[in-house]
Image: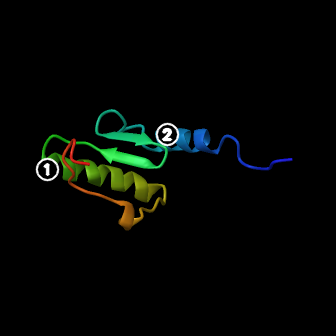
Amino acid sequence: MSFELKNADATYQRLMTKIFKPLIARTMEVYIDDIVVKSKTQVAHVQHLEEAFHLMWAYNMKLNPTKCAFGINAGSC
């Protein structure tokens, strides 16, 4: 009998959607463990990152700096 977590991905996605609801579709997209903060200008991008970091801090979330990329232009990945 398997004891793996069958709904872990869906549960995690729901949690991420709940945490980042104020930002999703406006300045952020979340897919499982990938988060994209999108902005039209560099100044706006810094503000949007601050909003995202504030929510992460409030929910005691941590980022792995080796997996982060900042200031990437659309289509350059």
Taking 70 as reference, is 39 above or below it? above
- Disc 1 residue crowd, few under 14, some 14–19, many 20+, Cα 10 Å: few
Q: What amino acid is labelled 1 in the image?
A: Gln
What residue is shown at x 25% (from left), y 47% (from top)? 48
> Residue 7: x, y in percent?
67, 40
What residue is shown at x 48% (from left), y 55% (from top)? 59
> Residue 57: x, y in percent?
42, 59
Q: Whole-Å distance between the Cαs marked 2 and 1?
A: 27 Å
Q: Which mark is residue 59?
A: none
Q: Secondary structure at mark 1?
A: helix
Q: Earlier in the sequence, mark 2 or mark 1?
A: 2
Q: Secondary structure at mark 2?
A: helix
Residue at label 2? 18
> Residue 71: x, y in percent?
20, 54
Foreground mark, 2 or 1?
A: 1
Q: Seen in the image, is 74 located left or right of residue 9?
A: left
Residue at label 1? 42
Q: What amino acid is labelled 2 in the image?
A: Lys
Counting labels gives: 2
